[in-house]
Structures are given as structure tokens and as C-alpha cells.
Image (cartoon, rainbow, N blue to C red):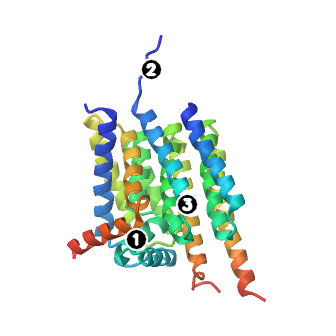
Amino acid sequence: MEVAVINPQEIALYACAAIAVYSAIRVIAEKNTLKKLPFINVMSFAVAGSIALLLPHPLTILAAAAYFIGTTLESNAIASTYAGGVREDE
Amino acid sequence: MPGDIESILIAAIVSWVLFITIDILFGLPKHGGVSGAREIAAAIEKGGGEIHGGYMMGNIVCSPDASAGTLLAACGVYIAGIPGGLAAAVLVYIGNRICYDPGYAGTTGALAATFVIYGFTLLGFSAAHFIAGMVIAILTIQGISHLHASRLISHIWRWRL
Amino acid sequence: MNEFLVFAFAGLLVLGTGATIFETDPFKKLISLSILIGGVIPFIVDQGLLDVATAVALIAPLTTIFILMVTRRSERGT
């Protein structure tokens, strides 16, 4: 009969999942579009950490990095487009 | 060996100090790196915050900086030890260039965090503690009150000058 | 993945979907879509489909960026 031991991976996963839900609620509650973006940033951190904790496999580093850099790029695009666009284009 | 909750809290404090130090050393609060960062800083300042803290928070959102480097290094060390952390540093470097950011804050953060976290794993911590710790650290800066966080960062920035 | 985690990430899915439906401003809808994607990715990773997760994680932000580029050009164009 196995004894249920809480290992660090599980506690860290619970923390990341809880922080993801909290920051998603803060995103929705925030009225100003630009101020939503830091909360999305926190959610990306939490989800990227959860990805790495759920499946420890070398390719997971690539998946977590791809997800995180993807959301960073997306937030950057939303922030610069919201305010009037990047000056270098066209 | 400390219990899990204390380990996560200690890891959070260590990650917080690490990424704030490296970001301030690289001058992130000085000016907005990409245009999106400047817009976010302006929005935070309009809400009552201070502009230098706003610049740093905008830079954290719009480009992988030391906080991103620390998180991905923690994931790398958790999965594959020091080689995993170094691989994460390479990925952060690529991410910086993809986001048009010419700086090295992210890569330096990832490299420093790899060795710091590996050192802590020799003391009985698990890199998983640092993953959760880094998420908690970024939550305190970007996820609770932008107003107070920007004032705190501006305060620390003034110490440096 | 035990029940707490399933509820948490499914909660992200529900919040993201609800917010996307009820928000009116297009930028806010795009931000709510990224909450939705953030909730989906852990489920994909949990099943072991790392390549699918990497593909979704790269394609979803790219489509957002392309949407923004198309919308911006149609505002300024003509």
C-alpha cells in the first residue's frame, strides 16, 4: 500500500495552477486594456511553470520556452498596436 | 531539510532578489525598450504609479528579461540539471532576438539562475521549489498592485543611482 | 493530473471562453483568447503530446499577430 507523500512537484503544481486562475480573474476584472497585460504575463509564467512540472521530459523545456516567448510576443504586439502601431512599418 | 512550504518561500525570495538585481543592473527601468513597453508604462503612470517602475514592468511584459530567464532556467534545471539550464538560456537568447530586444538581461538571468538553483539543489531544495518560487515572485511585482510595485521598483532604481 | 488541477485549468478555459463572448472591444477579446489558450496547453502536455503543445503554443500567438497586422492595415489603408 503506497503512502501518499506530497512531493515538491505536486505542491509547486498546485501553486502554479492557483496563481494562473487568480491572475486570469484579475485580467477579466481589469478595465484598462494595457493594464490587463501584466496580469496576462503572470498567467503565462504560471502556465509555463505548470507545463514543465506536468511532464518532465527534455522536450518540455522547448514547449515551455515556446509558449512563454509566444505569449510575450503576443502581448508586445497587442500593446504596441493598441496605442497606434509600430513606427518602423510602412 | 526545510519543509516544502518554507522551501518555496525561500526560493521565492531568492528568485525575487536575483531577477530584480539583474534587471536593475541592465537598466530596465531607465527607458522602455520596445514601443509596447512605453505604452504600458504610460498607463501605469496614469493610474498613479511612477514612470521608472512602469518602464520595468512594461519591459518585463514585452520581452524576455531576467524573470523569464530565471523561470525557464528553473524548468531546465528541474528537468535536466545544469545542461537543461544552459539549454533554457539559449532559448531565452533566441527569444530576446525574436522580440527585437538587443539586450542580454534575459540570457544573463538564465545563466545566473542556472548556477544559483543548481547550488540550492545541493542544499536539499528541489528545482520545482524554484519554479513555484519564481511564479510567486513575479506575482508580487506584476500581479497584485501595479501602483505599489512601480513605486517600489522606482525606489530601488533610485538607490542604484 | 488530479482533480484540483483539472478544475483549475478547466476554470481557465471557462473564464477565457466567457470573457471572449462577453467582451466587446476587439483587443480585450484577443487578450481573453490568450487566457483560453493558456488553459488548453496544460491538458495537451498532460497527455504527452509535446509536439502538439509546441505547435499550438507557436501558432496561436502568431495568428494573433497576423490578425493585428490585418486590422491595422485595413484601418490605415484605403
| Left or right: where C16 falls relative to B31 | right
Tell me if residue C50 can be seen. no
x, y (%) of residue A71?
A: 56, 60
The extreme right residue here reads C78
Provide the chain ID for the residue under circle 2: A
Q: CA distance from mark 3 to mark 2?
A: 38 Å
x, y (%) of residue C60?
A: 66, 58
Residue A61's place in the image compared with C19, above or below, is above
Mark 1 residue crowding within 10 angstroms, few (<14) / some (14–19) / many (20+):
some
Residue C57 appears in which quarter of the rendering? bottom right
Residue A65's place in the image compared with A78, above or below, is above
| Secondary structure of the residue carrying numbered label 2 | loop
The amino acid marked with disc number 3 is Ala
Residue tagged 3: A29
Quadrant assignment for the C terminus of chain B? bottom left
The amino acid marked with disc number 1 is Gly
| Secondary structure of the residue carrying numbered label 1 | loop
| Residue at image location 59% in from the left, 51% down from the top | C38
Residue C30 appears in which quarter of the rendering? bottom right
Residue tagged 1: B103
Instruction: Please give the label number shown on residue A4.
Output: 2
Mark 2 residue crowding within 10 angstroms, few (<14) / some (14–19) / many (20+):
few
The amino acid marked with disc number 2 is Ala
